[in-house]
């Protein structure tokens, strides 16, 4: 697991996908997780107001955290070489201390999405309505 920023080229490529966060000129801090030979980039958010993520610190009346619902599939060349450090040192420490838990919970989220019956449109929207995983059905072997 690494804390990095996406390159400008990677950001420009992925920013056109459905449900992707738009943070150009503000950085796009992510952690990377490898699952089944895929590298996932999970963004750090300053307003994590749902349960599909890992909450880190409460700051200015809102939770910061890692957002599983905005996961991206990337290549190693999409990452800047220099490490990313959150503004709050305690957030960085909490992420490092909970690497295994973050990995396990994201894997649960991913598996739940992959195995969820796609024909129930309303229910899938209620559970996964804003996920970026809709862009990666081929990579995740999800058949239409």
Image: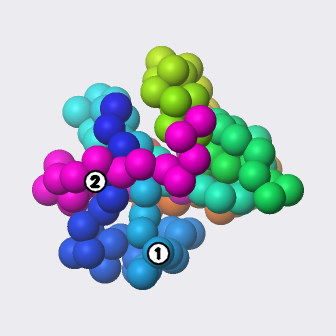
Q: Give the position of the N terminus as an image quadrant.
A: top left
Q: Position of residue 88 (x, y in %)?
A: 57, 47
Number of on-image labels: 2
Q: Is residue 96 above or below residue 33?
A: above
Mark 2 residue crowding within 10 angstroms, few (<14) / some (14–19) / many (20+): some
Camera sees residue 138: no
Asked whether 85 falls inside the magenta stretch, the response is yes
Q: Position of residue 104 (x, y in %)?
A: 52, 21
Report which residue position mark 1 lands on: 26
* Magenta highlight range: 68-90
Q: Position of residue 70 (x, y in %)?
A: 54, 56
Left or right placement of residue 30 versus residue 59 in this view: left
Report which residue position mark 2 lands on: 74
97 or 30, which is in the foreground? 97
Q: Secondary structure at mark 1?
A: loop
User: What is the C-alpha distance between the residues marked 1 and 2?
Assistant: 19 Å
Question: Most extreme residue toward the left, as rendered?
Answer: 77
Q: Position of residue 82 (x, y in %)?
A: 22, 52
Camera sees residue 74: yes
Q: Secondary structure at mark 2?
A: strand
């Amino acid at each position: 697991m690494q804390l990095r920023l996406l390159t400008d080229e990677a950001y420009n490529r992925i920013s056109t996908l459905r449900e992707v966060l738009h943070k150009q000129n503000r950085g796009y801090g992510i952690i990377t997780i490898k699952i089944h030979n895929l590298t996932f980039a999970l963004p750090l958010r300053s307003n994590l107001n749902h349960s599909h993520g890992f909450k880190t610190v409460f700051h200015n009346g809102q939770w910061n955290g890692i957002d599983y619902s905005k996961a991206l599939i990337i290549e190693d060349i999409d990452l800047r070489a220099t490490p990313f450090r959150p503004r709050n040192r305690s957030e960085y420490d909490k992420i490092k201390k909970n690497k295994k838990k973050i990995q396990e919970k994201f894997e649960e989220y991913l598996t739940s999405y992959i195995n969820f019956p796609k024909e129930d449109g309303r229910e899938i929207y209620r559970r996964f309505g804003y996920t970026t995983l809709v862009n990666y059905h081929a990579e995740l072997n999800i058949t239409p």
